[in-house]
Image (cartoon, grey):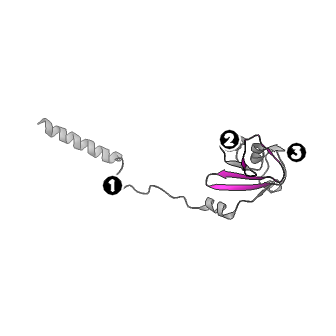
């Protein structure tokens, strides 16, 4: 095997769950081969360096051997060396920050209970206006 498409290779080494995900990432500019953006049909060769950006983490792989069929997790190190720095991997363990913990009373949209109270107040006011 002389060369393999990059989308197929990334799927084979389990960088992406599906081949279409790998293709979409290549088309979206999230995959670089030896420092250059690539299309899904770009050929990979032994010794190439692949950089994949998935979410907040940027993974780096070195091609050790070519493969075009999906491999089991235990066999992946035979085909690709993971060169991802530890700082990038630590981003996976970072706590997820919540943007909305508690709404102060009277701010934002009314809750269902607040809305019912407002409706009953309006009905009461309309009743007194009629008299």
Residue that mark 1 sits on = 105
Assign a secondary structure to mark 1: loop
Assign the N terminus to one quadrant of the image: top right
Please tell me whether mark 2 sits on a helix, a strand or a loop: helix
Could you classify mark 1 by the number of other residues whose Cα lies within 10 Å: few (under 14), some (14-19), or many (20 or more)? few
Q: Nearest the camera: 16 or 36?
A: 36
Q: Position of residue 13 (x, y in %)?
A: 77, 50
Residue 47: assigned label: none
Is residue 53 rendered magenta in the image? Answer: yes
> How far apart are the two marked residues, 1 and 2, measured between alpha carbons?
46 Å
Q: Nearer the viewer, residue 53 or 74?
A: 53
Q: Position of residue 5 (x, y in %)?
A: 79, 42
Indicate left or right for 120 with 33 as reference: left
Q: Which residue was labeled with disc 3? A: 2
Which residue appears at 61% of the width and 55% of the height? 56
Q: Residue furthest top?
A: 130
Quadrant that contains the C terminus:
top left
Magenta-drawn segment? 36-63
Determine the residue positioned at 88% across, 45% down. 2
Q: Quick check: 22 above or below 62?
A: above
Q: Which mark is residue 27?
A: 2
């Amino acid at each position: 095997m002389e060369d393999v498409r990059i989308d197929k290779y990334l799927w084979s080494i389990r960088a992406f769950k599906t081949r279409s995900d790998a293709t979409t990432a290549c088309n979206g500019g999230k995959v670089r081969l030896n420092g250059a953006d690539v299309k899904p049909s770009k050929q990979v060769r032994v010794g190439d360096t692949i950089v994949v950006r998935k979410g907040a983490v940027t993974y780096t792989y070195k091609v050790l051997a070519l493969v075009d069929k999906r491999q089991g997790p235990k066999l992946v190190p035979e085909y690709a060396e993971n060169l991802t720095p530890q700082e990038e991997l630590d981003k996976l363990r970072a706590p997820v920050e919540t943007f909305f913990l508690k709404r102060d009373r009277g701010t934002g949209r009314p809750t269902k209970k607040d809305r019912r109270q407002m409706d009953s107040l309006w009905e009461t006011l309309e009743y007194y206006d009629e008299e």
